[in-house]
Image (cartoon, grey):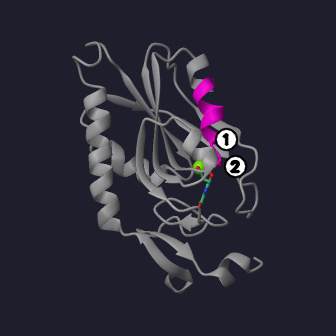
């Protein structure tokens, strides 16, 4: 697995520092008096990619929260180019009147957030904010309005810290690019 890495784009210590800052921003935005005293937060990681990021993030947000889960498939099979996003599973309790933060690993085409933000709004959430660890430098993702962004990265395919290639590499602690021959190899 280590031998498949081309280069480390964002090392783990830098990720941890930024996650800490993002958690502080989310906490501030969801703490009275900015929000009414009865504010209730529901954090919703978009699985599977946001699992690792969200696990670190929520442990630095010291406010009452519930967790909901949405599984969205945007890359059927092993393809690395974005295709239509689809909700394939949802475990969301009643979010009516609650302040929801949708957490995703990376903003690429924007298809995922364009799908899930209206879905959660339509369920009656009091507010829906969006949080992504990475935003790719491409026109489609720059157009999207996102509330919390960790890092802007070049338009390259990355894995690690929850992000996969063919469902592998999620457990790498750093965000990395893969060698060309690994990306091109047949399974
Ligand atoms: P979007 O729907 O914005 O095109 O893409 C969001 C989803 O596509 C992400 O949650 C992630 O699952 C996947 N994705 C987009 N770019 C990358 C990438 O560079 N690496 C990996 N591993 N997944 C990506
Ligand atoms: Mg995803």
Q: Which mark is residue 111?
A: 1
Q: Nearer the viewer, residue 81 or 143?
A: 143
Number of numbered discs: 2
Q: Which residues are magenta?
A: 109-118
Label 2 within 8 A of ligand 1 by Cβ = yes
Q: Nearer the viewer, residue 96 or 128?
A: 128
Which is closer to the viewer, label 1 or label 2? Answer: 1
Pinpoint residue 26: horizontal percent, then vertical percent.
32, 35
Taking the image as drawn, is residue 176 in sight? yes
Q: In the drawing, does residue 186 fall left or right of residue 120? A: right
- Residue, x 62% and y 24% (percent of image)? 118
- Label 1 element class: helix
Label 1 within 8 A of ligand 1 by Cβ = yes
State which quarter of the image contains the C terminus.
bottom right
Asked where in the image residue 184 lies, by quadrant, the reply is bottom right
Q: Are marks 1 and 2 in contact (CB under 8 Å)?
A: yes
Pinpoint residue 49: horizontal percent, then vertical percent.
55, 53
Q: CA distance from mark 1 to mark 2?
A: 8 Å
Taking the image as drawn, is residue 59 in sight? no
Pinpoint residue 18: horizontal percent, then vertical percent.
31, 53
Is 129 a magenta residue? no
Q: Which residue is mark 2?
A: 74
- Residue, x 27% and y 57% (percent of image)? 17
């Amino acid at each position: 697995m280590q031998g498949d890495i081309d280069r480390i784009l964002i090392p783990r210590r830098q990720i941890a520092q930024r996650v800490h800052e993002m958690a502080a921003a989310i906490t501030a935005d969801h703490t009275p008096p900015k929000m009414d005293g009865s504010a209730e937060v529901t954090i919703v990681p978009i699985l599977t990619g946001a699992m690792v990021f969200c696990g670190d993030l929520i442990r630095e947000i010291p406010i009452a929260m519930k967790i909901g889960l949405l599984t969205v498939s945007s890359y059927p099979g092993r393809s690395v180019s974005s295709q239509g996003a689809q909700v394939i599973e949802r475990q969301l309790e009643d979010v009516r009147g609650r302040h929801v933060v949708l957490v995703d690993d990376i903003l690429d085409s924007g298809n995922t957030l364009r799908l899930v933000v209206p879905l959660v709004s339509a369920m009656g959430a009091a507010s829906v904010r969006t949080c992504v660890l990475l935003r790719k430098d491409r026109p489609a993702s720059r157009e999207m309005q996102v509330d919390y962004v960790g890092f802007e990265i070049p338009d390259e395919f990355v894995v690690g810290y929850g992000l996969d290639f063919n469902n592998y590499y999620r457990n790498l602690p750093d965000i990395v690019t893969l060698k060309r021959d690994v990306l091109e190899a047949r399974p």
